[in-house]
Amino acid sequence: MTSTRTAELTLPSDKQIRIVREFDAPRELVWEAYTTPELVRRWWHARRGEVTSIAIDLRVGGSWRYAMTTTEGGFEVAFHGEYRELVPHERIVSTEVYEGGAGGTESEALNIVTFTEADGHTTLEILMQLDSRETRDAVLATGMEDGLQDALDLLEQTAAGLR
Amino acid sequence: MLISAYDAPMARAATTTDVFNAVAEPQRRALLDALTDRERAVGELVRDLGLSQPQVSKHLRVLREVGAVEVRVAGRQRLYRVNGQALRPIHDWVGGYEQLWADRFDALDDVLEELKQREGADGDDEHTNG
């Protein structure tokens, strides 16, 4: 009952993003939902589009790739990486590359995901380690698109009204 | 959702006019942190943060120029405080990414509910539709 169910985002340093969320389920199930392709397909879209591909080769040195098409604009968004460390039901360390980043740069992030269970609830922590502050800022800006588009539309209407 | 969206909103203005750049500097963020609970004088900031007086003054000037801090004169002291309104764009900016994960996790909740029901049924019901 103490579950807050709110994703909490903090920036522990210039090159890090930390996301924490508690789930009302034991960690074996959270792990399963987090690492099984058919299940990841059902939540990774974040209600912003349609998942087109989820590939997970869950072993150290194995690769992963997630792709989706956004509802707004119909863009393909894809990420891939490699598993570096796996402790079942506890910890995943993997690399992450955004395919087609701004300016053609492909910087690699290191993600550390930990699953901690207490009283049947699981706390999921995702710590993203980026290679620079600029990359971190670029990642943070990804959530802005809708708001930015709204703002641009509004600006356009306003400008049209001034003519 | 797209990182390429970065190009448009993040085209940076000069440090002195862009609150994002102003708070990108770690020492300036430390100053803002120190000012969040109450207003403080320069001397106090110098002592608490272990920076030199010229450093603190320089950073405060930049923060004032973007409106991130405000100053008032009280007797012989100049007291600085955070202006939350000026920091709002940063909050909104980070908030969008936070919302992305919030939506993702809400969808994950639904998946977990189904997995829990499957565990509960424990084989009676093989139709856990995936």
Image (tube, coloured by chain):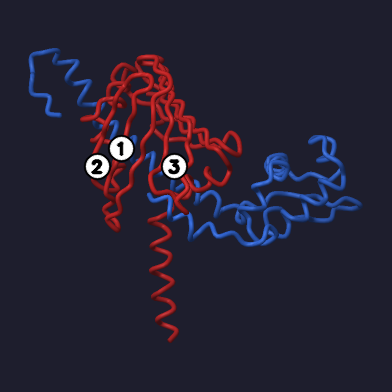
Nearer to the camera, A32 or A87: A87
Q: Quadrant of residue B114?
A: top left
Which residue does the numbered mark 1 point to in the structure image? Answer: A66
Question: Which hue is chain A drawn in?
Answer: red
Spatial separation of the CA atoms under disc 2 and disc 1: 8 Å
Which residue does the numbered mark 2 point to in the structure image? Answer: A51
Residue B24, given in percent of the width and then of the height, sits at: 64, 47
* Secondary structure under the numbered disc 3 in the rendered image: helix
Subunit that carries the residue with mark 1: A
Which amino acid type is shown beneath numbered disc 2?
A: Val
Please state which of the two labelled residues, at mark 1 or mark 3, is closer to the viewer.
Answer: 1
Q: Which chain is blue?
A: B
Q: Are discs 2 and 1 less than 8 Å apart at CB? A: yes
Q: Are marks 1 and 3 on the same chain?
A: no
Which residue does the numbered mark 3 point to in the structure image? Answer: B98
Subunit that carries the residue with mark 2: A
**From the viewer's perspective, is B111 left or right of B52?**
left
Q: Are discs 1 and 3 less than 8 Å apart at CB? A: no
